[in-house]
Amino acid sequence: MTALSDRDLPRFFQEADAASAKAQTATLRATQLRLVGVVAAAIGGVFTLTLLGVDVWAWVALIGFMVALAAELYLALATPERHWYQARAGAESTKTLSWRFAVGADPFFLELSVADADALFRRRITQVARQVNEAVQLPKGDASAPSDAMMELRVASLDVKRAIYLRDRTEKQRDWYTDKAKHNRLRATLWRVSLIVAEIVAVTLAAGRVFAGWDIDAAGILAALIGAGAAWLAVKQHSTLRAAYALTAAELEKQMISIRSASAESWAQSVADAEEAISREHTTWLASRGEVNEEVGYG
């Protein structure tokens, strides 16, 4: 036994992970279209250009509003955002259950027989699938069964379990959270600077009209741009995610110390603590979007 990757997790994880990525893409693209439509409508409302008896900019404003309305209706009726969150919860629940099973953590203790642990795992995965079935369906076949790689790791020695769990789970997750924290810190800074620059330009133009008699009326456009930027920040939540990812990375770093020194008696609890740290981040992520489903458990 040399590794346990996402490819070795149950088929339901692959389905939920793919469904989450698809719904996330749909949500972000629809949100972008809505914001672009609003900004285009604002630009069209400021200018006037008549060609062959047609007000071109009036059409730009109309099309912009229509695009924004279509995107808004799609988000409201198709609910891709909700499907994104549910599928993500299903994928992460399956992942933590799979790792708990593979290394013998609560509730899949190594004292359980292979048959009992296998049956319990299938029940837990089926339960998760039932709780998120609005977003992703449990595929037909043996989609809730532990994989051969998971079974192989479960019967491996403690030293093998420790090495693979540290490298393929905790270290990989810690590095992912660390990288994402840096990425979101940079994005948050760039967006904040951009919004501040736009607001300074807006104040300058408004002051020029009031005090210098400038004949420039771009306040509506700038207001729409600033509003769109603020709305996009609310969707992406860079600052919130930066803090959450940095905290989880730090918690995992501490848990890795415990895992490295865990005895056979304390092993199950050490793994459970590390999995709880990861699960808390996902629960916080869902809560920040108002989509906590208390029925979906991470282990």
Image: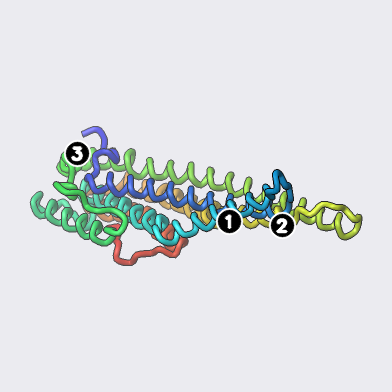
In this view, which residue lies farthest toward the top?
2
Instruction: Give the amino acid type for the residue marked by disc 3 in the picture.
Output: Ala
Instruction: Give the amino acid type for the residue marked by disc 2 in the picture.
Output: Gly
Placement of 294 over or under 78, stated as above or below = below
Q: Earlier in the sequence, mark 1 or mark 2?
A: 1
Q: Residue at x 44, y 61 (%)?
A: 76
Q: Residue at x 58, y 56 (%)?
A: 65
Instruction: Give the amino acid type for the residue marked by disc 1 in the picture.
Output: Phe
**Residue hosting label 2:** 220
Q: Quadrant of residue 203?
A: bottom right
Spatial CA distance of label 1 from label 2 is 15 Å
Left/right placement of residue 192 relative to residue 68 reads right
Q: Position of residue 242 (x, y in %)?
A: 52, 51
- Residue depth check, mark 1 versus mark 2: number of the one nearer the observer: 1
Q: Position of residue 21 (x, y in %)?
A: 38, 46
**Residue hosting label 1:** 65
